[in-house]
């Protein structure tokens, strides 16, 4: 029977994984992506150890992922200890927080075998992240500790999940590039919005429920259309609408379109990654840190025009693919690690 047509059976391990995934994704949103950056006033000289640790963690995870069932609780316990003083973290502590995220993120992505579980987890994450976004960064210690405790508890009951039987996996340059560009477009707009006092959305009471509603609708639409072959074109249109709304200073439209597109592309990414072996998945995961860093630099340098160029590049890449050009469609072969 086709796995996609099998009934959705949810066990204790699935619920535990849902809790774990939601808690860790929320931790990334509220603590690593926004909390640490805001507390250190976006000073790259102070926060650069976080992405360095993240990228090193992803590389290290390739060698350690087969021990993930034992390793995950210990990593989350360390995260819990570091969270107690996350706001005052020195360079080494920031490096360790990044390292933990880099180690755990691809392991969690590899564990996904039921897309609806991950989709619900994203919904929970976006709800919590939106509700607590207006809490100042230096006051999020309780949140960091609570999320770490929840994630640690979930890791104790979540089973490692699927095993790969194949020896080789292929992933196209096209998929790697489009996923990276989606992440970069999101990071550039989010980091710019976070520093724009006139267009700021998150943490604004007027738009809080708009954001939550359209995050939810984006998740539902993406899950329903997960096999839709026109997703890449849809992403161009949705990001174009979000960028136009920002450029026209229309917060009402932006509060509708942007949360929708964030949710939509995240589910689309998970759907593309969930069947990959660990090595190609880890390679794609490196793009998250790269995109986040470039997006932050675009915001800090006030060169949002560069983000428009990235959107144009995405359109060109998708057009090349539609015209059957092999430049971005070449498959890369990875030797998959069993686990």
Image (spheres, rainbow, N blue to C red):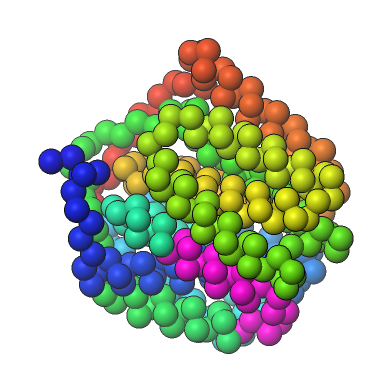
Predominant secondary structure in magenta?
A: helix
Of residue 49 and residue 313, the one placed in the foreground of this image is 313
Q: Identify the residue shown where x is 48% and y is 63%.
A: 123
Image location (x, y in percent) of residue 336: 29, 40
Image location (x, y in percent) of residue 114: 30, 54
* In-image side of 279 versus 140 (left or right): left
Of residue 227 and residue 294, the one placed in the foreground of this image is 227
Image location (x, y in percent) of residue 7: 19, 53
Which residues fall within the magenta stretch?
A: 121-141
Is residue 46 in view?
no
Count up the numbered dots: 0
Is residue 37 a member of the stretch shown in magenta?
no
Q: Identify the residue shown where x is 30% and y is 70%.
A: 15
Task: State which quadrant residue 238 falls in.
Answer: top right
Q: On screen, 124 above or below 248?
A: below
Q: On screen, 108 above or below 75?
A: above
Q: Identify the residue shown where x is 52% and y is 84%.
A: 145
Is residue 223 in view?
yes
Of residue 249 and residue 174, the one placed in the foreground of this image is 249
Q: On screen, 64 above or below 244?
A: below
Q: Identify the residue shown where x is 82% and y is 38%.
A: 305
Quadrant (top left/top right/bottom left/bottom right) for the N terminus: top left
């Amino acid at each position: 029977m086709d796995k996609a047509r099998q009934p959705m059976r949810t066990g204790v391990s699935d619920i535990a994984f849902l809790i774990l995934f939601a808690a860790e994704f929320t931790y990334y949103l509220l603590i690593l992506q926004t909390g640490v950056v805001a507390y250190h006033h976006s000073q790259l000289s102070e926060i650069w150890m976080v992405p360095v640790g993240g990228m090193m963690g992803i590389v290290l995870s390739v060698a350690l992922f087969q021990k993930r069932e034992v390793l995950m609780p210990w990593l989350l316990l360390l995260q819990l200890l570091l969270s107690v003083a996350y706001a005052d973290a020195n360079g080494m502590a920031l490096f360790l927080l990044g390292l933990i995220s880099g180690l755990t993120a691809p392991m969690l992505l590899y564990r996904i075998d039921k897309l609806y579980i991950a989709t619900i987890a994203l919904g929970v994450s976006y709800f919590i992240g939106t509700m607590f976004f207006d809490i100042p960064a230096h006051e999020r210690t309780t949140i960091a500790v609570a999320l770490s405790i929840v994630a640690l508890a979930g890791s104790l009951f979540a089973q490692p999940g699927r095993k790969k039987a194949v020896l080789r996996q292929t992933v196209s340059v096209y998929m790697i590039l489009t996923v990276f560009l989606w992440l970069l477009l999101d990071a550039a707009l989010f980091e710019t919005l976070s520093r724009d006092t006139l267009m700021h959305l998150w943490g604004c009471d007027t738009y809080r429920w708009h954001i939550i509603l359209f995050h939810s609708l984006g998740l539902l639409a993406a899950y329903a259309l997960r096999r839709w072959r026109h997703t890449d074109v849809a992403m161009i249109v949705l990001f174009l609408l979000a960028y136009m709304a920002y450029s026209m200073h229309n917060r009402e439209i932006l509060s509708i379109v942007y949360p929708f597109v964030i949710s939509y592309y995240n589910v689309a990414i998970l759907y593309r990654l969930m069947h990959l072996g660990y090595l190609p998945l880890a390679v794609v995961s490196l793009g998250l840190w790269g995109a986040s860093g470039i997006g932050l630099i675009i915001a800090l340098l006030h060169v949002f025009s560069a983000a428009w160029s990235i959107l144009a590049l995405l359109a060109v890449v998708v057009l090349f693919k539609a015209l059957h050009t092999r430049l971005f469609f070449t498959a890369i072969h990875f030797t998959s690690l069993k686990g």
